[in-house]
Structures are given as structure tokens and as C-alpha cells.
DNA sequence: AAGTCGAACAACCGCGCAAAA
DNA sequence: GTTTTGCGCGGTTGTTCGACT
């Protein structure tokens, strides 16, 4: 049986200290992103490689943008989500300086609610037939779609709700189908969109790593025609 | 001022995939 | 052809902090 990659005892968990961050940064600056499994020991970190990788990719990488998402970025996320579903790494790959985790969090905390407030199902980008309570009483949302008292879309509810795009089960057909339907739902969005039209982000870590990401392997993005949509 | 609630976000977990052995 | 290994992904959880009562 395969042994877990993080089964070593006495490993630190939880928040990273500044010292740990610095060790990781120093090591990667010196040696580059080598084998994540062996990196912690080599760098003198009591963390599993996975944890180091995550910390580096999501927080320590020098090319990270951080800060609020712009309107353009938000638009792009919505469009890409309509195309790709919950393929956060692919979506993030088109947003320079953004990570999949960041995009995912932003989607769940901001965009998702925003769409719901507009009566759009964030799972399939279709207009809900039943008018949501939020539309009947728009005052429940302010301009930033920050729900003042929206218990209906509580954290648990949103995270536990079934996703249309189950991981690994979304074919490009399904994705394009969603996109087609979303055109009607989102008339303001120009979904005459192809991957080729989207400005490429700076190479991600995985791309730099000479490894094709899992997601691109699954979707074969290297052949853009797969995802080009025409209305 | 204290307590409660919810949003935001960092981090972890489990799984699938591809490459290597 | 099968098993093992490591990476990367998406989903979920935990923690922090600000707003509100």
C-alpha cells in the first residue's frame, strides 16, 4: 500500500511562522523548486512537502499579486467558470499573479453570492426560475454584495451544496454546454470566448516545473479548439 | 464592554493522475 | 502489466477579525 506522504510524526501543522517562511524562501531561492517531498528535510523544516508546496504557491511566491480583485478579473473569473466549472487551477492560470486557492476563495465568498443576488445560479450560470428572496428584497444586499443578514447562503450551505461540476467528471462537452446555457443567463457577458482570446498569465509554478498540470492534461488545453466556443 | 455571528482566507485532506520502478 | 511514488487539484475545515447586538 502507498504510504501517506505526510505520515511522519512531529510535523508542524497549522499557521506558518515567519522563520518557517524564511527558511522556505531561502531554500527555494537557492535551489529552486526541487522535489517537494525531500525539500522540507533539506530546508530544515518540520513540515510535509505538500504543506511546503502549498505555502509557496499560495503565499510566498514573489510573483503573487494579492489584494482585491479588479472588476476585470472578476468578470474573467465568471466567464471562465461558466466555461470550465470549478477548475480553479485553470482559471487561476489565466489570472496573472492569482492562485487557484485565492480564486476559489474569492468565488465562494464574493462572486457566488453576487450571482445569487442577481438571480443566477452560480453552479450552472443559469437564471433561476424562482425569484430568490434576495431579489424580492434587494436591500438584503448592498452594492458589494456583502450580505448583511443573509443566513440563506451561509458558509456551510454553500460549501456543502452539490456542485454541478464534480471534479474529474466535467467533459469539455459539458463545459461548453454550460457555457451555451450561460449565454442566455448572462447577456452582459461576452461568451464568444476562447482560451486563445484570454490573455495568458505568467507561467505558473507547475508550468515552470516542466510538468503539464493535471487539469491541462485532462482538458487538453494545448489544443484550443477543444474549448473554443462560438455562438 | 462583552458576546455572537458571519465573512474572509489560510491551511489541510483525500483523491486521481502520470511517471518511474 | 503492475505497483509505487510524487505532484497537483478541488473540496473542506479551522482560525482570525470585524460588524453588529
Image (spheres, coloured by chain):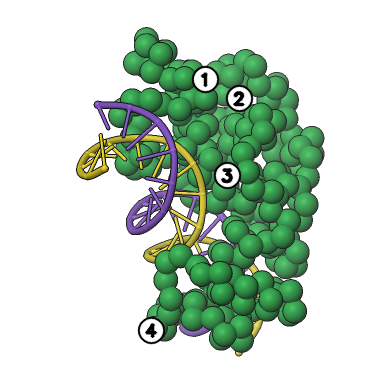
Chain colours: A green, B yellow, C purple
User: Which quadrant of the view contains residue A71?
Assistant: top right
Q: CA distance from mark 1 to mark 4?
A: 48 Å
Distance of label 3 from label 1 (alpha carbons):
21 Å
Can residue A182 be seen in the rendering of this structure?
yes
Mark 2 highlights which residue?
A180
Give the quarter of the image for residue A155: top left
Mark 4–mark 3 distance (CA, rounded to whole Å) = 32 Å
Which numbered disc flags the more N-terminal residue, 4 or 3?
4
Is residue A1 shown left or right of residue A222? left
Q: Residues within 10 Å of mark 4 (few under 14, many from 20)?
A: few
Which of the labelled discs sits on residue A143, or is there none? 1
Distance between the alpha carbons at the discs numbered 4 and 2: 50 Å
- Residue at point 37%, 11% (across, down): A137
Label 3 neighbourhood size at 10 Å, few (<14), some (14-19), many (20+)? many
Q: Is residue A69 left or right of residue A10?
A: right
Q: Earlier in the sequence, mark 1 or mark 2?
A: 1
- Which of the numbered marks, if any, corresponds to residue A9? 4
The chain holding disc 1 is A
Circle 1 or circle 4, nearest the eye: 1
Query: Looking at the image, is C13 positioned above or below residue A116?
Result: below
Element type where label 4 sits in the image: loop
Residue A193 appears at what percent x and percent y? 72, 30
> Which is closer to the viewer, label 3 or label 1?
1
In primary-sequence order, the first of circles 1 and 4 is: 4
- Asked if both marks, 1 and 2, belong to the same chain, the answer given is yes
Helix, strand or loop status at disc 3: helix
* Number of marks: 4
Question: Which residue, as the protein is rendered here, is positioned at the far top?
Answer: A136
Q: Chain of mark 3?
A: A
The residue sitting at 68% across, 61% down in the picture is: A61
Measure the C-alpha gap from mark 1 to mark 2: 28 Å
Of marks 3 and 1, which one's residue comes earlier in the chain? 3
Amino acid at each position: 500500500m502507498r504510504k501517506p506522504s505526510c505520515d511522519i510524526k512531529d510535523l508542524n501543522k497549522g499557521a506558518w511562522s515567519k522563520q518557517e517562511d524564511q527558511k522556505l524562501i531561502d531554500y527555494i531561492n537557492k535551489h529552486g523548486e526541487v522535489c517537494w517531498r525531500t525539500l522540507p528535510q533539506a530546508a530544515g523544516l518540520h513540515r510535509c512537502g505538500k504543506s511546503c508546496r502549498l505555502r509557496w504557491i499560495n503565499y510566498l511566491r514573489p510573483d503573487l499579486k494579492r489584494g482585491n480583485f479588479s472588476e476585470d478579473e472578476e468578470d474573467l473569473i465568471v466567464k471562465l467558470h461558466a466555461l470550465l466549472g470549478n477548475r480553479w487551477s485553470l482559471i487561476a492560470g489565466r489570472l496573472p499573479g492569482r492562485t487557484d486557492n485565492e480564486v476559489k476563495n474569492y468565488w465562494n465568498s464574493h462572486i457566488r453570492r453576487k450571482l445569487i443576488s442577481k438571480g443566477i445560479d452560480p453552479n450552472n450560470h443559469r437564471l433561476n426560475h424562482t425569484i430568490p428572496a434576495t431579489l424580492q428584497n434587494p436591500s438584503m444586499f448592498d452594492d458589494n454584495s456583502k450580505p448583511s443578514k443573509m443566513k440563506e447562503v451561509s458558509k456551510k450551505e454553500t460549501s456543502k451544496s452539490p456542485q454541478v461540476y464534480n471534479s474529474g467528471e466535467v467533459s469539455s462537452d459539458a463545459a461548453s454546454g454550460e457555457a451555451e446555457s450561460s449565454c442566455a443567463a448572462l447577456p452582459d457577458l461576452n461568451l464568444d470566448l476562447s482560451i486563445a482570446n484570454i490573455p495568458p498569465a505568467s507561467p505558473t509554478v507547475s508550468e515552470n516545473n516542466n510538468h503539464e498540470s493535471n487539469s491541462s492534461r485532462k482538458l487538453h488545453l494545448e489544443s484550443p479548439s477543444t474549448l473554443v466556443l462560438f455562438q
